[in-house]
Amino acid sequence: MKIFIPLLFALLITSLTQAQTQMNTTTPRAAAQIDHIAILVENLPESLSFYQKVFGFPRLEDPFRDEVHAWLGIGHGLSLHLIEDTWTSPTIDKNNHLCFAVSDLQGFIDNLNRLEIGYEDWPGAKKSVTTRPDGIQQIYLQDPNGYWIEVNDSLRP
């Protein structure tokens, strides 16, 4: 569970930063902003391939210049830092998840089907979509390490 505490904090800050950016007010900027989210992975090449093929995230320059770190651009000047290290399988719960927004959820789902990657709705029904009370549609999938990822269509026109 301790792996997810920094991740949850980072996601909270990201949500707050995006909400503030979307507000058309004179609200002052936060003194600190999220820079990146780091996740431990068991197999760096496999995880790197997954995030590039599924999400199309571009690879960024690796400041460490080694074989155990990879950086991906995830939008809004943020990055996802993949770190391969000694793997101890964490307790993974769907409530602890990354979330990425797309403008075309069906197109994203079509790509998942092409790549033969499963997805489900919030309750766990395979190949199903959840519609939130605000009309946003969302699906959930797992990366090669078992981390949950929500994908929603909050960027739709």
Image (tube, rainbow, N blue to C red):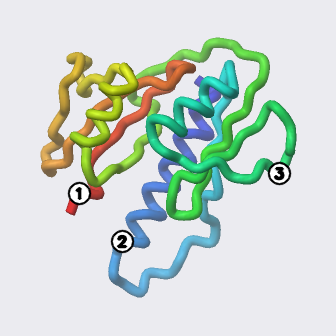
Q: Are marks 3 and 2 in contact (CB under 8 Å)?
A: no
- Taking the spot 60% from the left edge, 28% from the top edge, the residue there is 47
Residue toward you, 155 or 40:
155
Q: Earlier in the sequence, mark 3 or mark 2?
A: 2
Tag 1: amino acid: Arg
Residue labelled with disc 3: 63
Tag 2: amino acid: Gln
Residue labelled with disc 2: 22
- Taking the spot 24% from the left edge, 26% from the top edge, the residue there is 121
Secondary structure of the residue carrying numbered label 3: loop
Q: Quadrant of residue 125?
A: top left
Q: Is residue 16 above or below residue 108?
A: below
Q: Which class describes the residues within 10 Å of circle 2: few (<14), some (14-19), or many (20+)?
A: few
Residue 14 locus on image (x, y percent)? 50, 55
Residue 138 locus on image (x, y percent)? 25, 38
Instruction: Report the Cα–Cα distance between label 2 and label 1.
Output: 15 Å
Secondary structure of the residue carrying numbered label 2: helix
Q: Earlier in the sequence, mark 2 or mark 1?
A: 2
Instruction: Report the Cα–Cα distance between label 3 and label 2.
Output: 31 Å
Residue toward you, 95 or 128:
128
In which quadrant of the rendered image does the N terminus lie?
top right
Tag 3: amino acid: Pro
Instruction: Report the Cα–Cα distance between label 3 and label 1.
Output: 34 Å
Q: Which numbered dot is residue 156?
A: 1
Q: Are marks 3 and 1 in contact (CB under 8 Å)?
A: no
Q: Left or right: 48 with respect to 150?
A: right
Residue 28 locus on image (x, y percent)? 50, 81
Q: Quadrant of residue 113?
A: top left
Residue toward you, 41 or 30:
41
Q: Quadrant of residue 66?
A: top right
Q: Which numbered dot is residue 33?
A: none
